[in-house]
């Protein structure tokens, strides 16, 4: 039969330690506590908490006793109590000696920190805080220690980068953004930082070694000028790709601008007819031609106003009512229908997998857009022409920003679950932890195979 001290040591899941005693008490709120008195064994009592090398004894603080929260045992709060002293490490200076059950600077055991980190990746922060009996800020610190334990050298994510995606996503109201870089080959976030723009992205490129820069072959992103400038400056030989999704989004914005313009014209026409043919007293006669004309003009304007969804969809996905709307527009408004057709032509040419064929189709589309006599599409022509090679690169390499857009959705979900982050570092830690293939080891569990 195991002794009480051995049993406590096994339940705490600690090695390199000696349990010297136990105590049980109930606090003023009626909550049960167990105190486990422990110390590092003689071989490790003077180890550095960072390099784990044996160092010289320095001194003992005035308050040399500390306690660490451990995982509850059946709802009973467990505390590990031990004496601490300082050592003099040649590399890290004077620091508090390592204890085998806790990370440096933590007031919790390693199992406690890892469990909080695992729960925080799946549950709202308020839920984790209540269940583990800690505050919200402590959850963030536990996540930080968990990440540093399972991935102490995060810079390794920057090795062997070949295909990367760059994008920014908002995390808070008031134009608060973070820049995120994803490795397309591993679908993991390799770098994230607060802010967006050329200055932030330059920080990423400047920390890369010449070998790491030379390994990058493809960079995907939207049409942001600051992305192109950084790519041209630091990796001029790589392929800069503009995501086809964003190109179609440009066309959709141009189409919607034309639709709003046409709707305003139709609405003004209906209003003018209503002023020229005011309605008299009483009910209008059924055969009143003027009233019917005004109603038809208003109905036409209303149809254009409500046609945004039908015009934006692919023709093969339209419902009967949506097809009727598009047919009405084709019959009554040639300009809006031509804009819709040009949007669809651009969408279809982006699906072509042969680069030469796509280049020929894009050349024809650019000519049509430049001669369309539609202001919004003339502006789209200029924008598309600037990014012509970047669009063709996306077709040539078969790359898109789909992975990083999916990552952005994960980040927004993280922010939503936490009801926002006050500390930006806590959010970045969660991004690194969740948007990668890291696995948090839970105590006394068989590791899952990757």
Image: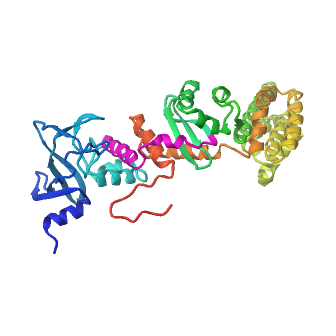
Q: Is residue 324 visible?
A: yes
Q: Is residue 185 above or below residue 72?
A: above
Quarter-wise, where is residue 37 in the image?
A: bottom left
Q: Is residue 188 above or below residue 229?
A: below
* Camera-side residue of 225 and 379: 225
- Residue 357 at what x, y percent from top left? 88, 43
State left or right for residue 435 relative to residue 232.
Answer: left
State left or right for residue 437 relative to residue 268.
Answer: left
Residue shown at 69% from the left, 30% from the top:
236
* Camera-side residue of 215 and 386: 215
* Camera-side residue of 334 and 244: 244
Magenta segment: does it hold 151?
Answer: yes
Magenta segment: does it hold 418?
Answer: no
Q: Is residue 279 visible?
A: no
* Camera-side residue of 317 and 321: 317
Residue shown at 15% from the left, 58% from the top:
19
Bounds of the magenta span? Answer: 136-164
- The colour scheme of the drawn protein is rainbow
- Residue 42 at what x, y percent from top left? 17, 52
Q: Is residue 202 above or below residue 301?
A: above
- Residue 23 at what x, y percent from top left? 9, 58
- Residue 134 at what x, y percent from top left? 27, 47
Magenta stretch mostly in which secondary structure? Answer: helix
């Amino acid at each position: 039969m195991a002794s009480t001290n051995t049993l406590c040591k096994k339940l705490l899941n600690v090695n390199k330690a000696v349990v010297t005693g136990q105590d049980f008490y109930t606090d003023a709120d009626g909550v049960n506590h167990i105190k486990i008195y422990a110390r590092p064994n003689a071989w490790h009592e003077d180890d550095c908490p960072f390099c784990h090398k044996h160092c010289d004894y320095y001194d003992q603080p005035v308050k040399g006793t500390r306690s660490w929260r451990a995982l509850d045992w059946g709802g009973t709060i467990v505390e590990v109590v031990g004496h601490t002293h300082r050592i003099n490490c040649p590399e890290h200076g004077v620091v508090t000696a390592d204890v085998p059950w806790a990370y440096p600077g933590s007031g919790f055991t390693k199992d406690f920190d890892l469990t909080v980190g695992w729960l925080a990746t799946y549950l709202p922060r308020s839920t984790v805080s209540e269940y583990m009996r800690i505050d919200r800020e402590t959850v963030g610190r536990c996540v930080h220690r968990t990440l540093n334990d399972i991935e102490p050298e995060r810079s390794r994510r920057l090795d062997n980068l070949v295909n990367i995606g760059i994008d920014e996503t908002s995390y808070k109201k008031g134009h608060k953004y973070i820049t995120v870089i994803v490795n397309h080959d591993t679908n993991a976030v390799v770098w994230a930082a607060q802010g967006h723009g050329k200055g932030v992205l330059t920080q990423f490129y400047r920390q890369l070694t010449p070998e790491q820069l030379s390994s990058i072959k493809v960079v995907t992103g939207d049409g942001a000028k600051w992305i192109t400038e950084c790519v041209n400056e630091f990796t001029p030989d790589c392929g800069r790709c503009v995501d086809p999704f964003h190109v179609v989004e440009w066309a959709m914005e141009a189409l919607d601008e034309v639709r709003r313009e046409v709707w305003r014209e139709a609405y003004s026409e209906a209003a003018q007819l209503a002023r020229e043919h005011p309605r008299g007293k009483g009910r209008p006669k059924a055969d009143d031609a003027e009233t019917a004309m005004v109603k038809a003009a208003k109905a036409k304007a209303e149809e254009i106003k409500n046609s945004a969804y039908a015009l934006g969809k692919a023709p093969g996905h339209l419902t009967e009512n949506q097809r009727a709307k598009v047919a009405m527009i084709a019959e009554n408004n040639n300009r809006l229908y031509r804009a819709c057709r040009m949007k669809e032509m651009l969408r279809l040419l982006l699906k072509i997998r042969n680069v030469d064929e796509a280049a020929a189709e894009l050349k024809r589309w650019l000519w049509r857009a430049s001669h369309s006599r539609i202001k919004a599409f003339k502006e789209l022509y200029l924008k598309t022409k600037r990014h012509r090679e970047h669009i063709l690169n996306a077709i040539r390499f078969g790359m898109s920003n789909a992975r990083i857009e999916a990552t952005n959705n994960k980040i927004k979900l993280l922010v939503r679950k936490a009801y926002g982050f006050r500390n930006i570092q806590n959010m970045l830690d969660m991004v690194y932890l969740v948007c990668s293939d890291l696995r948090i080891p839970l105590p006394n569990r068989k590791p899952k195979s990757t």
